[in-house]
Amino acid sequence: MRFTKIKPKIKKNLDDQKTIKTNSIQELVKLALPYKRKILLACVCALLVNASALLQPYILKLVIDDFLINGVVQTGFYSIISMGILYLFLSFLGGFSSFAQVNLMNSAGQKIVTDLRNRVFKTIQLLPLSYLDKNSSGRLITRSTNDINDISNLYTDVIMNLFKDVILLIGIVYVMLSLNLELTMISMLVIPIMVFLLLLMRQHIRKSFLSMKHYIGKLNGFIAESISGMKIIQIFNAEKEKEEEFLELNNTYTKTTLLQTRINSIMRPASDLFQNLAIASLIWYSVDKIFNHTLQIGVLYAFTTYIKQFFAPVSDLADKYSSIQSALVSTERVFDLLKQKDSLEDLDRGVSKNRFKGSIEFKNVWFSYNNKDWVLKNVSFKIDSGQMAAFVGETGAGKSTIICLINGFYKVQKGKILIDGVDINTIKLKDIRKNISVILQDVFLFSGTIKSNITLNDPIDDKVIENAVKVACVDRFINDFPNHLNEPVLERGNTLSAGQRQLISFARAIVHDPSVLVLDEATANIDTYTEKLIQQAIENISKNRTTLIIAHRLSTIQNADVIFVMKHGEIIEFGNDLELNLLNGYYKKMLEESELTKNQVYYTS
């Protein structure tokens, strides 16, 4: 009974692996189709290389048997000198064809991989936050670097050599059969044993590569995370603990690579051993026939040469087998990412709304990140165009989730979100993102310059940039830099202070002229003096714009038109500052606690 249960499962797994392998090969062929001319030319060159390799031993066989042993009279082209010239010509032809084949295939391969890398990066850019929440950055980095490099090696090195080797093997077998059937059969006795061993190792090789890909992804993610959080690691003296984590992960990866190395190390020695066995068997079988004059020495010489030529591509195929398996696994992983078409954000799908008026309404909205635990529960509110609205509440109340939903990063499970009376799900995402600018507490700056971080390389007029710089108070510190707006910014803006980064992000939002401005704890990292400047800037740019503010500092939102007080995913109070104070509820309690904390800090200072 146990056997009958397991057997179908094994068969299903094998069928699944065959399907995956077939799909991977089909995808690789599709990638190559736009460059089929170069690939076909490379194939022609490979055929010329093989023809040269096949004819040269035959020429030597003719010279040995006809002219050196049997003393055949040399006439015209049928002479040693002519054969020598032909041999030399074939050598040059083979060399030139090999040169052309490598260059053609590398050119096509690099263009194929460039197209693939562009597709992968574009896909990553369009992946929804729900996908990115569940998949680590290391996994995506591995897909776009290590896996694509494996596919690159497949095109530039493996595929053409595989084609050339297979054609050469077929040619060698054909020539050997035409020369002597018995010697051919003796030479091929070791092939079934080789095939059996290769099939035996195939599953181990695939499992090893899957394990390697998994752990290199974890390593990439761990290193990227550690570099980003190096300041925290050093502040808390956590270098030793992180090093131990890395060593454990690295040792596990090393074990998988060592297993792969051991498997690979068997391939070529095994091929060389079988080659020597085939030659030994051939010589043992041929000695008596040569003495009995039933076999010519030239034929034996040609056969030993062909056997060496035969096992050279076999050894090459053995070496390339690991690369092929690695590339197929990588192809499967890359196209698994590219097949996320259904979940990709389609920026141009929906109704076009070039400019929002700025009215935002939530109607009985329920939302959960995991479809189980509700973060927002039956939330309803309306913000009129041009109003300044604030959301306050304890951490985890759902404030930032509202911002994510307004930007279209997630879709609600129940209820509706309306912008200017139109369901947000029907509006083009491109138009939503164009009309809503968000200033986050954790500012992200890209490598480049201050100007490129403000414009994000969009073609924006210099006067608009200068105005945004003034409104955001960025001009208060950029004039201290020698290059002003063209001052270099290192990765994540590490050479700038937290306040400077925040002001740059503020200018970034302003310069794109949004209809809706969102500030998510945007003043948290700014000193008191700069905060006053920001408050003035907010007042200036919020005119004729809908402004949403999420804040823990209640002093920053007291001038808001409406304040929504949130608790456990629900709006429990709303109104302006005066109305909420008169209500004498949760907001006033928060305000009193905030004032008490501020006084305690002041007294301690």
Image (spheres, helix red, strand yellow):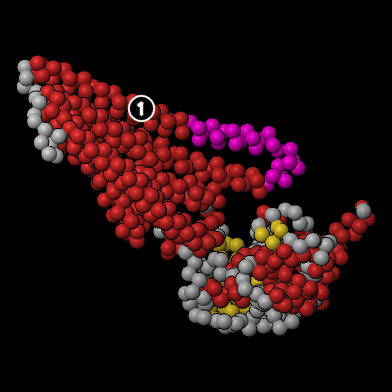
**Vertical relation: 591 (above or below) 217:** below
> Which span of residues is magenta-colored?
229-256
**In the image, what residue type sits under mark 1?**
Ile
Q: Looking at the image, can residue 249 be seen?
A: yes
Residue drawn where x is 42% and y is 41% of the image: 210
**Horizontal side, residue 49 vs residue 82: left or right:** right
Q: What secondary structure is marked by label 1?
A: helix
The percent coordinates of residue 4 (x first, y second) are 24, 38
**How many marks are shown on the rendered structure?**
1
**Vertical relation: 331 (above or below) 412:** above
Residue drawn where x is 19% and y is 40% of the image: 171
Q: Nearer the viewer, residue 87 or 572?
A: 87
**Vertical relation: 16 (above or below) 378:** above
Residue drawn where x is 22% and y is 29% of the image: 305
Hey, which quadrant is residue 410 in on the image? bottom right
The percent coordinates of residue 375 (x first, y second) are 60, 62
**Horizontal side, residue 371 vs residue 89: left or right:** right
Q: From the image, give the main secondary structure of the stretch colored magenta.
A: helix
Residue drawn where x is 51% and y is 44% of the image: 217
**Horizontal side, residue 77 vs residue 234: left or right:** left
Q: Looking at the image, can residue 8 be seen?
A: no
The percent coordinates of residue 1 (x first, y second) are 24, 35
Hey, which quadrant is residue 517 in on the image? bottom right
Q: Is residue 603 magenta?
A: no
Q: Nearer the viewer, residue 316 or 30?
A: 316
- The residue wearing badge 1 is 266
Hey, which quadrant is residue 434 in on the image? bottom right
**Vertical relation: 565 (above or below) 251:** below
Q: Nearer the viewer, residue 420 or 159?
A: 159
The percent coordinates of residue 157 (x first, y second) are 37, 44
Q: Tell me if mark 1 has few (under 14), some (14-19) or many (20+) residues whose alpha carbon lies within 10 angstroms of its own.
A: few
